[in-house]
Image: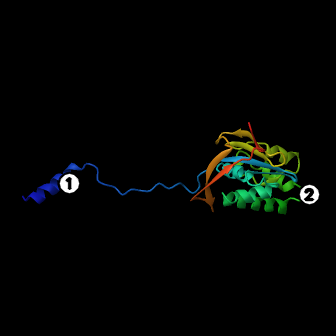
Amino acid sequence: MSSEDLDTNVNAGSDPAPEREAIPFRRPPNRRRFTMRYTIIDPQGSISFVGPCQGLKALVAACAQDSPRTAEDLLAAAGEYDSDLRDSVLNGLHVFDEHNLPGNYAAIHAALQGQGDEAGTSPVFRVVDDVTRQASLQPVKAGLVLFNLKQKRIVQIQNTYADIEREDRGRVRKKGRVTGRYYDYRLPPDWQVLP
């Protein structure tokens, strides 16, 4: 028996676990996202929606930009940091406006009543009456944060995700994916964060 044969036999017998191909981790496409309710109050009224928790930092950073006056201004500014958040909420508002006429809110009432335990499926809506007002004040999963643009207040009614910082840094998201870019923000002194 040659030394090569001996090395082959020894090496083959000494490795009890054969080498396996590494399988990369992939998140399932249907995984549930960690979500919370956001309600934005501006001089024209209020809108409310359920969105991913990472949208919180983008909305706070948007408040730091020239004090947005309307919900649409806030969402446009937040879109620089998270384009999906902006697009999904603005598209949801268009759907709300198509299906709900002044004085006839049966469509949004039915949608809010039908959500049951799946609060993460709540539609984007304008606060137009007592039913929508109550829904806009209901925390979802990680909580509820109000952005009062009139009084320059961010009110954390319930927030189990992360405390809002007056100065912070976030990652830019485009089309639902994290990019390699970062943004920094600093809330002006006239903005209050409660509690």
| For residue 18, side relative to residue 180 (left or right) | left
- Residue furthest top as drawn: 195
Q: Secondary structure at mark 2?
A: loop
Depth check, front residue: 49 or 56? 56
Using the rendered image of the protein, determine whether residue 34 is visible from the camera's viewpoint. Answer: no
Using the rendered image of the protein, determine whether residue 10 is visible from the camera's viewpoint. Answer: yes
Task: Indicate the quadrant where residue 140 lies.
Answer: top right
Residue 107 x, y percent position in the rendering: 83, 56
Q: Callout 2, which amino acid?
A: Pro
Q: Earlier in the sequence, mark 2 or mark 1?
A: 1
| For residue 155, side relative to residue 102 (left or right) | left
Residue 98 x, y percent position in the rendering: 83, 63
Q: Secondary structure at mark 1?
A: helix
Residue 72 x, y percent position in the rendering: 79, 58
Residue 172 x, y percent position in the rendering: 62, 57
Q: CA distance from mark 2 to mark 1?
A: 79 Å
- Residue furthest left as drawn: 1
Task: Indicate the quadrant where residue 167 lies.
Answer: top right
Q: Residues within 10 Å of mark 2 (few under 14, many from 20)?
A: few
Q: Which mark is residue 12?
A: 1
Task: Indicate the quadrant where residue 70 lies.
Answer: bottom right
Above or below, 22 relative to 193: below
Dot 2 and dot 1 residues touching (CB under 8 Å): no
Q: Which mark is residue 107?
A: none
The quadrant of the picture occupied by the C terminus is top right
| For residue 172, side relative to residue 115 (left or right) | left
Q: Which mark is residue 102?
A: 2
Above or below, 84 relative to 135: below
Depth check, front residue: 191 or 43? 191
Q: Callout 1, which amino acid?
A: Ala
The quadrant of the picture occupied by the N terminus is bottom left
Depth check, front residue: 33 or 160? 160
